[in-house]
Amino acid sequence: MRNLFNWLNWPSFWFGAITATVIWWVLALLRPTFRQMLDSLREQQRERALQGNADQETAYRKIVFRQTQSAHLAASLFALDEIAMETRLLAPPSYADPGAPHPHIEITEQAIPYLPDYPEIATLYKDQTLTIPEALSGGVNLILVGQPGMGKTTALAHLASQIVNRRPEVQSLHEKIPFFIHVADLNLPLKDPKKATDFLNPIVDKLLEVSGVLTAGKLPGFVEYAFQSGRALLLLDGVDELTPNGVQEVTAYLRVILRQFPRARVITTGAPEHVGGLLSLGFVPLSIMPWNRQQQRTFLQTWTMLWQKYVAPEAWAQAFLTPIDPILLNRWLLEGNTGLTPLELTLKVWAAYAGDVRGARPVDAIEAHLRRLLPPQAPIEALYAIGAQASLNALPLFESGRAKDWTKSFEPAPSAPSEMPETTAEPVSAETAAAPGGAGLLGGKSASKKNAAPPRPASLVSQMTVSGILAAHGGSLVRFAHPVYLGFLAGKALSPAQAEPILNQPPWLGRTTTLRYLAAFGDVSALTNALLTTEDHILLRPRLTAARLLRDAPPKAPWRSAVIASLIQILQNEDHPAGLRAQVIAALALSGEPNIGALFRQLMLSPSNELRRLAALGAGVVHDSKSVEALIQVLNTSAGVARQAACLALVEIGTPEALEAIATALLNGDEELRIAAAEALANNPVEGYETLKDGVTSQDILVRRAIVYGLARVREDWARDLLSKIPTQDEQWVVRNAAVEILEALQHPNPRVPQRELPPEQMPWLIEFAGKYGMGVIPGEPATDLFLLALKDDNPDYRRAALHYLRHTPTENVLAALYPHLYGEDPEMREGVFQVLREMAMSGVRLPAPQKFGLG
């Protein structure tokens, strides 16, 4: 041992030990840095790998373009981009945090209750709308909501096409990569996903079906790149067709997608009846607007041009179609379209041009279309059977084998079944689909050789899939190509007695559409009686469902009077909020009831200012010229929103007497009435625009000031030019200030664009409010108690803000705090609470009776 110690070089030993200690100490200090460097290198390597997939983007955009051009009703005739109209969404009510400036609220937002279930009213009165890019600009994900036939699928497909073609209308979305897919192609729920990217596999699988350029090896990486980089825009179609259970499966899927790829954006579709848990994920439901009269005219002109370009020159068209004068035909087609969906108008026009009109009702155009698509030799009863069974069993999607069982009795008996393989049906050509007589017009003869042994014909289900009545998806799933087909066929096939079990189904689109078409074809007295006596204390949804049956039902249906009487009871009950009663007005105005104008005239004599307002709006919708005198009386005897509604109705009716009354209000009314008259004139592109232009130089200061607000509602360059000159050219400061305020408001973010909600700890107003009570906002913790406290505050801005955030917290404590406002004296809070409860119900929340909270 002594020799060992003698052998050691002690200076070297201690130097080495100290050096090693220092090195390890430095390494320990640098270990986090090294780890960060390694992570950074891995991330850079991943980014380079993902970026390499971006090279496939050009080819992918071409695939999307091809995919979208057939995703519309008239795909057998025209490409989507040739015929598509711009999609507009009903702007939700204005919202601004407490303390933010309050801009001027336009006449339509004040006079018309927010009616997402009846956007026809907002379309007629030209309420403010949003494009899809505008609606996305606030950072939210969207649900496009609407009745079947409103154009939800077309809206998604057209948006995808615009993005991949970098159209200027979607400039803010140019860098997005759209993925347009039907929910049936997701095959939910997924089978045992192992990792996050497994949730992208259904999208990859669908793209592989339509891809002719990208290889299977490159496609998964490209899809992952799009979602990881935040460039993905998932356009998920068909969710509106599902039952509540199906919507919940979609919600679970999207929850994982948004958690794993938080920068991805999603737009999906929803039914007014039910959107499940999508609202809890931060989705915002916005209603698709029906086409206004100008859009209908533009569509008709476009259809005429394309028909003459593509269809009329065809030999079959010259042989089978009677020559028509498109000017005279279009003049007829433009009449009587109030309340029609884009689908119904398209089918009405198609039937007129194809010469197979079956009647004047929308249901006649639907039947003409289905018969036009019906394969040769296929009995229409087979279609009825599929529609009836899908409706009775609440099956928006069903196995093709099951559909074949439903139609088995309608299959033709083969002449030699043992030797004949099933053939694949030939696709229906554009000219065949367009022609009267349907798919069998040109003979429907087999293309097989004369001496060949006859093959076993394709099944009826296969033929209907090829013809476009049914749509096939992976895993042998089949659905109706449009939910209107399902409801129409079920309504045609079932007797009201056979359909009674449908009333017990959960809320879904198939239930609603089947009831509508049952009412069109049979006596549904028993069904409507059941709806009218079903309790729904807050939203009265069964009675409003019965109201929707009026439009398509025969005028002398025995149950109509009972439904209308029930609706009038709702109108006359002052305890009901304006939003609920306005739905009744909309249903009555669109019901087709011939004497409904007389009802509105009678209601305008009511002492209730609210009822006069709603009746005035109804009179304008039906263009009841006999209501002009009553509307003038409303102008002279009412206040606030009732006068505004009367102004809108008078301009919409547009007779000389009605416009003269508006001119009188503009020239001689008080300041509020003058502004209402000027804003209403913005709805009339002829006399209204001329009056606004002339009013800029009026000698009356109050007229010129009112004209400023009217010009602000005209979304045209000439109006903006006139507004921009007023601050420097008008002599009176009250006029100049009004123009300056309007122009400044136009430069600020639109308060009607939905915004992504901040967590409570990042809300300045809530932090300030909590400070008033010596409280704090804890990060990561719910602030429900603070919002409930704000709901009781004297400041209306705090109450509105609290209501805005409580709509996602449907607990019993929150409902107990909301219900008293529904019966309170503050009309703004009543309306706000009603809309919050309506959204909660769309999510599947069961609203208790008011008696539970000692109300009602």
Image: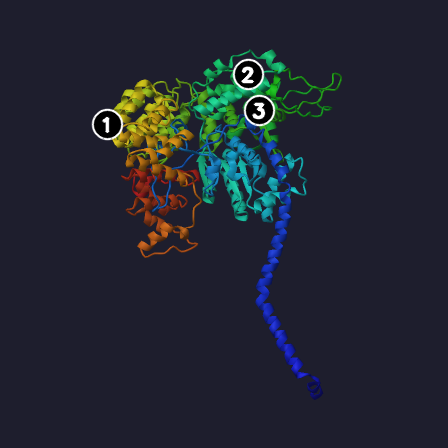
The residue lying at 59 percent from left, 24 percent from top is 76
Which percent across, then down, holds residue 527?
42, 26
Quadrant for the N terminus in the image: bottom right
Q: How many marks?
A: 3
Q: Is residue 525 above or below residue 580?
A: above
Q: Secondary structure at mark 1?
A: helix
Quick check: 14 left or right of 341? right
Residue receiving disc 1: 637
| Mark positioned earlier in the residue sequence (3 or 2) | 3
Residue receiving disc 3: 78
Quadrant for the C terminus in the image: top left
Q: Nearer the viewer, residue 257 or 755?
A: 755
Farthest residue in the right direction? 451
Residue receiving disc 2: 354
Q: Nearer the viewer, residue 785 or 766?
A: 766
**Residue 734 appears in view:** yes
The residue lying at 44 percent from left, 24 percent from top is 294
* Disc 2: CA contacts within 10 A as few (<14), some (14-19) or many (>=20): many
Q: Secondary structure at mark 2?
A: helix
Mark 1: amino acid: Thr
Asked whether the beta carbons under mark 2 and mark 1 sit within 8 Å of each other, the answer is no
Mark 2: amino acid: Ala
| Mark positioned earlier in the residue sequence (1 or 3) | 3
